[in-house]
Structures are given as C-alpha cells and as structure tokens.
Image (spheres, helix red, strand yellow):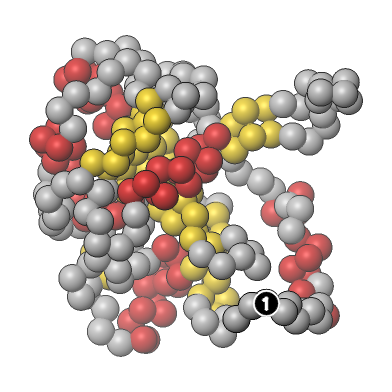
C-alpha cells in the first residue's frame, strides 16, 4: 500500500543549495522511493524571485512568463509550459513579501536531482516529482499538479484493455504524475506547515530511466473541455441550495 511521509524542514531561503538541503533533511532514500519536492524551493534555489511592487509590474511579469494570457474577474488565466494556470504560476504566499516564479525547467531539475540522489544513496531505482498546486474548473479548492518528474512514467495507458465486463477501453489513460502530486500536496500542506518535501513509498508506478516530458500534454484542439469553454458565455448557472 502506498505511503506518503511529509518531511518538516527549516525554512528554505533564496539562493540556498537545493541538493544540500534535501540530503540534510532526508537522511535516507531506498530503492523504489519517490521524492517529492515543492516547486517553491526549486524556484528559490534558482533565484526565480521578483520584488514586485505595483500591479503594472505584476502584469508585465505574467505576460513575460506565459505563452497566452487573459484577465478575468479574479485573476489572470494563462497558459505556461502547455498548462492552464493562474497568473503564470507566480505566487506571493510564503515568499516574505516577494513574488516567486515557477522553476526554469522542472523536468531537468527532477532528472538532475535523481541522478545525484541515486549516486549518494547508492540506489538504482528512484523517482523525483516536483509539484505545484492548481484549481479545477468549477471546483473550489486547490489540488496538486506535477510540474516535472523523473524516474517513472507519468501516464498509465489503458487503451485497448478491457473493463470488468469485457468492454474494450478506447480513451482511458491514468494521469499518474498529477495523481501522486495531489496526494503528496495534501500531506505536505499549503500554509505554514514547513513540509516542502515528502517521500512516497510503494507507489503504483512503472520506473524508467527515460521520461517523455510530452506524455501528459494534450493538443488544445482535442481537449475535452474546449467546447464547454467556447460556449461558456452562453451558460446560465443553476443556483444550488445548501445548508448555509
């Protein structure tokens, strides 16, 4: 059974050495473990921090950091690194008054950490997962998302397999990477927990030395939500009654 152990640490500061921080906080990794690292400390280690003082400066950074952007009622809706996210992922929480951007290349960082940690702990099978948090459309609350990973396949392809009644599956693929990220972020927390690391054991993944960073990407023209958002302005939302 899969187990997630969050790691409480000291506060990670801008410019700190990421590998040294991890090996000081995680004393042992075993073959088959997956190390989870929040993107915030990756970005801090890379100096991906800005001192943004005005809304105009913030808008400029959002435009620089994203491939597409539109301002909505509450936030900026953007596309960055082939993912839909708020405000190109820039974040002011736990930033000591500054703004933290997303890491430069989370897949590359995950791969580099994996190689270094495998060498240090003398193991041959290890996963590294770099996480952030996102909102689902029309759902309250955040969930975890995988920005980059190494050492395991991020998608389980069930197309062509049969369900319990013998019906052949035509579309079903399981998003392993984001599923692990969501489970880990739930344990790591998003406020003052100081748990930027976690170790997952017995994860149901297929380990590999080579990761296809495009395996989670969906052509926007094939995305299941595209027709919904194309017609969104015409939708009249039904009021939902509740106990509040």
Quadrant in the picture for the C terminus: bottom right
Residue at image location 76% in from the left, 53% down from the top: 224
Q: Quadrant of residue 171?
A: top right
Q: Position of residue 93 (x, y in %)?
A: 30, 68
Residue at image location 36% in from the left, 86% down from the top: 55
Q: Position of residue 103 (x, y in %)?
A: 33, 52
Taking 133 as reference, is 99 left or right?
Answer: left
Q: Is 199 rendered above or below residue 188?
A: above
Residue 158 at least partly seen: yes
Residue at image location 21% in from the left, 13% down from the top: 122
Mark 1 burial class by Cα count in 10 Å: few <14, some 14-19, many 20+? few
Q: Position of residue 18 (x, y in %)?
A: 18, 42
Taking 242 as reference, is 168 left or right?
Answer: right
Q: Is 223 rendered above or below residue 209?
A: below
Q: Position of residue 70 (x, y in %)?
A: 57, 76
Please give the count of numbered marks on the rendered protein: 1
- Foreground pick, 166 / 104: 166
State the residue position of label 1: 242
Q: Secondary structure at mark 1?
A: loop
Residue 106 at least partly seen: no
Residue at image location 50% in from the left, 78% down from the top: 75
């Amino acid at each position: 059974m899969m187990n997630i152990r969050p790691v409480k640490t000291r506060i990670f500061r801008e410019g700190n050495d990421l590998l040294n921080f991890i090996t000081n906080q995680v004393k042992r990794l075993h073959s088959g473990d997956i190390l989870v690292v929040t993107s915030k400390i990756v970005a801090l280690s890379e100096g991906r921090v800005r001192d943004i003082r005005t809304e105009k400066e913030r808008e400029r950074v959002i435009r620089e950091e994203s491939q597409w952007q539109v301002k909505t009622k509450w936030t900026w809706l953007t596309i960055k690194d082939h993912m839909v996210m708020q405000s190109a992922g820039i974040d002011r929480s736990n930033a000591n008054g500054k703004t933290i951007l997303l890491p430069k290349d989370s897949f590359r960082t995950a791969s580099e950490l994996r190689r270094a940690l495998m060498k240090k702990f003398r193991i041959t099978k290890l996963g590294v997962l770099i996480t952030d948090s996102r909102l689902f459309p029309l759902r309250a609350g955040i969930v975890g998302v995988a920005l980059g990973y190494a050492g395991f396949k991020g998608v389980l392809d069930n197309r062509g397999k049969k369900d319990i009644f013998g019906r052949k599956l035509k579309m079903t693929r399981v998003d392993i990477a984001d599923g692990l990220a969501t489970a880990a972020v739930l344990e790591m927390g998003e406020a003052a927990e100081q748990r930027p690391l976690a170790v997952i054991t017995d994860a149901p993944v297929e380990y590999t030395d080579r990761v296809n960073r495009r395996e989670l990407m969906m052509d926007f023209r094939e995305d299941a939500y595209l027709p919904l958002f194309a017609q969104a302005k015409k939708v009249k939302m039904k009021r939902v009654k509740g106990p509040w």
